[in-house]
Amino acid sequence: MTDESERAVQAVIDAELRLLDPEVRASAARVLELLDLEFTEFGASGRRWGVESILTVTSGGTVSSESPVKVSEMSGVVLAPGIVHLTYFADNQGRRAWRSSLWRLTETGRRLYFHQATPVPSEAE
């Protein structure tokens, strides 16, 4: 991976972690700074989300500072100039999922364009 690719991947990792931060999620303005205007998500619930619907759920406090999302195995790759694919495992209070994000570079910075979560059953199931 080139230095430029490494910087792009690290910038996206930092942005993804900001989106998981309870303080950021509590602010529609801060979330909007990270979402692409064409953002779409297929959530672990199977629901399709857009910018407006994701702002509604994030403002509802789905991530608390007492129980932050635990992230592991985060890695990324530059797919094309300005496009980074990020994958990771997340545990949000026992709701476990593999997550995949596509970030694109816009005139105003890196923005989350697409996100998908695939639920993982607990070991007990």
Image (spheres, rainbow, N blue to C red):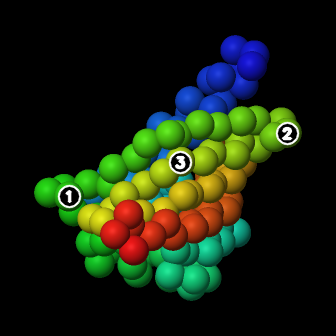
Q: Using the image, determine if residue 83 lies above or below residue 49.
A: above
Reading the image, the residue beneath label 2 is: 80
Between the residue at mark 2 and the residue at mark 1, the CA separation in whole angstroms equals 35 Å
Left or right side of 9 for 72:
left
Residue that appears at 43% across and 55% down: 90
Q: Position of residue 95 (x, y in %)?
A: 37, 68
**Amino acid type at mark 3:** Tyr
Q: Position of residue 4 (x, y in %)?
A: 72, 20
Label 1: few (<14), some or many (≥20) within 10 Å? few
Inspect this view and state whether residue 27 appears.
no
- Mark 2 element type: strand
Going from N to C along the chain, the mark reached first, 1 or 3, is: 1
**Amino acid type at mark 1:** Ser
Going from N to C along the chain, the mark reached first, 2 or 1, is: 1
Q: Using the image, determine if residue 91 lies above or below residue 1.
A: below
**Amino acid type at mark 2:** Ala
Left or right side of 67 for 37:
right
Q: Nearer the viewer, residue 12 or 34?
A: 12
Q: Position of residue 67 (x, y in %)?
A: 20, 58
Label 3: few (<14), some or many (≥20) within 10 Å? some
Residue projecting furthest to the top: 3
Q: Nearer the viewer, residue 1 or 31?
A: 1
- Mark 3 element type: strand
- Mark 1 element type: loop
Reading the image, the residue beneath label 3 is: 88
Res. 67 mark = 1
Q: Quadrant of the N terminus?
A: top right
Left or right side of 28 for 88:
right
Residue that appears at 33% across and 55% down: 69
Inspect this view and state whether residue 4 appears.
yes
Residue that appears at 67% across and 62% down: 114
